[in-house]
């Protein structure tokens, strides 16, 4: 690649939401800032994106958003993403189900781009590659809201209508390093055969066995840095103090990950705080 080496930065937005930036060029993945309460979701009430919160975050992030990417179409990944795309004049990239959420907004067809495995997409200074993945057993040992969204999702809908669609991991290659977004805590054995990444943004909510998960994802990718994401309670508003997702067992994740400290380092992100990751990439863990 011919781009100059710029500082790569990651800002965690809670859940699996991240901004990845190189200079003033950014891409958003799974931005979710509306965070309606548990009662609303559990009662099956229609969910409305919080337009003010979306605008506030776009202003706060202060960068050119080149694309909004969605890893799967559950509400905590896909409710707000089309509105981020609309307000940022950026394409929405994701599965057919995700694009049907975009059509319901409505986003014009020219702003909808379907993710495909095996074909890279150049966005600003980044090369994006989608890798088929699997959703974790997040609710009572099962994948919540399976199925696809076959029609444009017009108007407010309850959480159950935000069906899963395809689940993707997203490999982001830049001259300064490679970042992988693994938004949901499932995996397909062998999915990372021949793939390496410096940094893994690892969704840990609703995971199964932590050791098997780390071995099949972080170790296979030969990651130098593992940054857990999707461990915050997303029924709590973003301007309130972060709470852990019930049942996420963050301590168990840390203890298990600690066994691999000669292979990768853990980076614990704080919501809304921008972290430059060039130095993480260039200084591997002490052997
Ligand atoms: Zn999900």
Image (tube, rainbow, N blue to C red):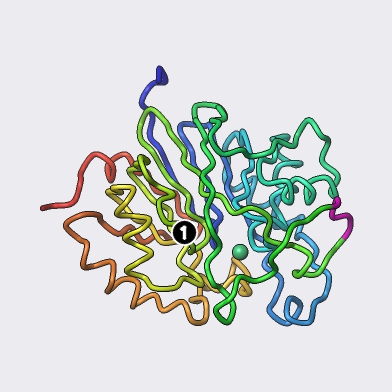
Q: Could you say where residue 204 lies in the image, as x and y percent from the top left? A: 45, 66
The segment highlighted magenta reads: 151-155
- Quadrant location of the N terminus in the rendered image: top left
- Please give the name of the residue rendered at 58% of the width and 44% of the height, measured from the top-left corner: 28
- Please give the name of the residue rendered at 49% of the width and 30% of the height, measured from the top-left corner: 126
Vertical placement of residue 64 versus 247, above or below: above
Horizontal side of residue 131 vs 74, given as left or right? left
Name of the residue lying farthest toward the left: 287
Q: Nearer the viewer, residue 198 or 23?
A: 198
Which SS type dominates the magenta stretch?
A: loop
Q: Could you say where residue 70 lies in the image, as x and y percent from the top left? A: 63, 49
Q: Could you say where residue 105 lies in the image, as x and y percent from the top left? A: 84, 48
Tell me the element at label 1.
loop
Vertical placement of residue 148 versus 5, above or below: below
Does the segment drawn in magenta span residue 154?
A: yes
- Please give the name of the residue rendered at 46% of the width and 61% of the height, measured from the top-left corner: 229
Q: Nearer the viewer, residue 172 or 245?
A: 172
Which residue is tagged 1? 187
Horizontal side of residue 215 vs 109, given as left or right? left
Vertical placement of residue 210 versus 53, above or below: below
């Amino acid at each position: 690649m011919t781009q100059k080496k710029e500082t790569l930065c990651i800002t965690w937005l809670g859940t699996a939401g991240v901004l990845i930036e190189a200079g003033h060029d950014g891409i958003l993945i799974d931005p979710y800032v509306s965070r309606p309460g548990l009662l609303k979701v559990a009662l099956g009430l229609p969910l409305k994106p919080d337009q003010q919160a979306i605008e506030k975050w776009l202003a706060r992030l202060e960068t050119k958003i080149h694309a909004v990417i969605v890893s799967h179409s559950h509400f905590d990944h896909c409710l707000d993403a089309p509105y981020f795309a609309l307000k940022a004049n950026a394409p929405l990239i994701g599965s057919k189900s995700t694009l049907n959420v975009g059509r319901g907004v409505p986003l014009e067809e020219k702003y909808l781009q379907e993710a495909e495995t095996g074909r890279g997409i150049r966005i600003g200074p980044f090369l994006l590659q989608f890798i088929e993945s699997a959703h974790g057993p997040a609710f009572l040992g099962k994948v919540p809201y399976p199925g696809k969204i076959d029609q444009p999702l017009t108007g407010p809908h309850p959480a159950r209508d935000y069906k899963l669609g395809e689940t993707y991991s997203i490999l982001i290659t830049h001259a300064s390093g490679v970042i992988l977004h693994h938004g949901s805590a499932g995996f397909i054995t062998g999915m990372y055969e021949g793939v390496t990444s410096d940094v893994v943004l690892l969704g840990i909510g609703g995971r199964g066995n932590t050791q098997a998960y780390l071995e099949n994802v972080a170790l296979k990718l030969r990651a130098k840095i593992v940054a857990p994401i999707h461990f915050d309670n997303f029924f709590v508003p973003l301007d309130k103090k972060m709470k852990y997702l019930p049942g996420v067992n963050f301590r168990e994740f840390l203890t298990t990950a600690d066994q691999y400290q000669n292979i990768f380092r853990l980076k614990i992100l704080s919501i809304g705080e921008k972290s430059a990751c060039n130095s993480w990439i260039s200084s591997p863990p002490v052997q």
